[in-house]
Image: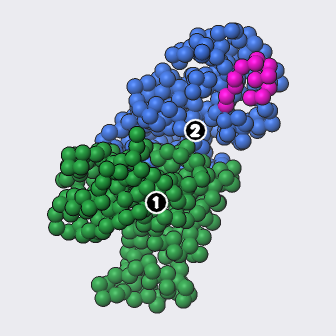
Chain colours: A green, B blue
Amino acid sequence: MSKPFSIGVDLGGTNLRVAVVSREGQIVDKITVSSTGNIIESLVGAIGKLFSGEINGIGLAVAGLTDGKKILNAPNLPILREIDFVRILQERFNTPVYIGNDASLAALGESVSGAGKDLNTFVMLTLGTGIGGGVVYNRKLLSIAGELGHIVVEPGGRLCGCGGKGCLEAYASARAMSTVAIEAIELKRETMMVKDADCAITPADIYKYANLGDPLAIEIFKTAGFYLGIGIANYINIFGPDAVILMGGLIGAWDIFIKKAIKTATASAFKELYAKTVIIPSTLGGDAGIIGAAELTYC
Amino acid sequence: MSKPFSIGVDLGGTNLRVAVVSREGQIVDKITVSSTGNIIESLVGAIGKLFSGEINGIGLAVAGLTDGKKILNAPNLPILREIDFVRILQERFNTPVYIGNDASLAALGESVSGAGKDLNTFVMLTLGTGIGGGVVYNRKLLSIAGELGHIVVEPGGRLCGCGGKGCLEAYASARAMSTVAIEAIELKRETMMVKDADCAITPADIYKYANLGDPLAIEIFKTAGFYLGIGIANYINIFGPDAVILMGGLIGAWDIFIKKAIKTATASAFKELYAKTVIIPSTLGGDAGIIGAAELTYC
């Protein structure tokens, strides 16, 4: 018989987040530890503080490609690939341990207790530094590769972090927008935007200038929105989902970025399919991946 | 208890094909009738000849969008949309009747007794006048929209029959290649290719001239192959399948068309995912859809 709580871990980012999650997908306790230093010791310590006889198992969300047991590729934190988290934690805590892609698990989380709670089938896109995603089909997470940010939306286009060219991520992610802004400033395009002390510019900055009427800032969001719309239309035509759920800081720019994406998707997707799809924001935000990871122990 | 045979019907094309299919996916009897005249009467007549107490049910494959019960959109034969095949056949033969998209069902057929027989997860693309497809996931057909020919591979590109712009079908289908050839001839591009009496030119003609070294004919196949490769890479990154199975007359041009597609997909898909995927031809060909339709009665 399954126990009423699980531990969900988010291995992404500069911090590790470890949480106790209820069967209903509510976070009841949470610890954050630094991912610098000995990751596995920090992780074992944090889980140890939260572990009890009520825990059904441990689920790990990682920003990378996994096969359900091992990490195959973790571009943002390559060291993760060298550690066999599943085996180590299984032996240490004598409990089942699962691992999955953080964006896919965010989709699962939204299905358990978020924006996808009442939906059968949806596609989730996480719009952050990169773009990831997951597909819930008939209330179950599809354990597909789910590299939804790496469909080509512009053949031969901008180089993507994955080594490919013209991926959705190379056009509609935070990193892509910042890169385009920097390039334009260096090319002396007319704009109010200025680089900060690190010679960087964030999407939040671009958004601020877009709201001040800066044409370059507006153009950056609209171009990104156009390609996001192409990607959304593709996923609507492939899956015919009830919804496309969007997550990540960039959806703060809904009125300019997402609105353009919706306009493009409307023109590009099959009418019969678009008509039954809603495009909505995530309700769990940054907790979706942890909740999804914890849910793995019940799947 | 299920009965050992089913009836599969292919409602596409200028002929209706009705077959008795064994539980193992072998066609044991087949009738072809014209789709001109009263379609439903022809169909009822043909099924009547094959029906017996050994029949588990009837499955219909249609070149269009269905919701499992009704035809939502049948661009090639709009009259199909007006007929409630499922209800009529159910009442007439007092047996369960199912309906699905022909390309999706071709994927199911390949899974039952074709190239996908020993595969867990694969994407099938049917390369014909248009482009369709289906996805088999963990040995089951995903009942998704599956409009796999209508992902955008060239934003703002060639107008597609679906009303969208730049779809895979607008670049890599037989219709697309013929259109490109005609346009080039009309623009007086240098080529050995000539239009036939109907001012048309088929992919078989283009292939013949490609083999004679005609640069335009070669270019047409390579361009189509490039876009097909982009599409294949997208499906590999989304699904991480064991295989991409290709079907349809166009795969006869494997050495130039599909070879270019494979080269493009290799460069574009995630290496870890591409490495575990094979790109192979269908083994059932034109019978795949009927076999898949029949299989619906066992799903």
Q: Mark 1 points at which residue?
A: A26
Q: Residue at x 64, y 33 (%)?
A: B100
| x then y, percent, for residue B269 | 37, 49
Q: Which chain carries label 2?
A: B
Q: Look at the numbered disc 1 and give the secondary structure of its residue.
A: loop
Locate residue B137 relative to residue A29 in the image: left or right: right
Q: Is residue B222 above or below residue B6?
A: below
Secondary structure at badge 2 equals: loop
What amino acid is at disc 1?
Answer: Gln
Which of the two residues, B90 or B258, is positioned nearer the viewer here?
B90
Quarter holding residue B40 = top right
Residue at the front extreme, as displayed: A53
Residue at (16% x, 67% y) in the render: A37
Query: In the rendered view of the protein, which quadrant contains the C terminus of chain B?
Result: top right
Q: In this picture, is A192 found above or below A25?
A: below
Q: In this view, does B258 lie above or below A103?
A: above
Badge 2: few (under 14), some or many (20 or more) residues near its Cα, within 10 Å?
some
Counting from the top left corner in percent of width and height, residue B195 is at 62, 38
Marks 2 and 1 in Cβ contact (< 8 Å): no
Is residue A257 in sight in this rendering?
Answer: yes
* Amino acid type at image mark 2: Ser
- Looking at the image, residue B96 sits to the left or right of residue B125; the answer is right
Residue A94 location (% of width, % of height): 24, 45
Query: Residue B52: which disc?
Result: none
Q: Using the image, name the chain to which the residue with label 1 belongs.
A: A
- State the residue position of label 2: B143
The N terminus of chain B: image quadrant: top right
Q: Magenta region: which residues?
A: B86-99
Give the residue drawn at x 39%, y 47%. Answer: A3
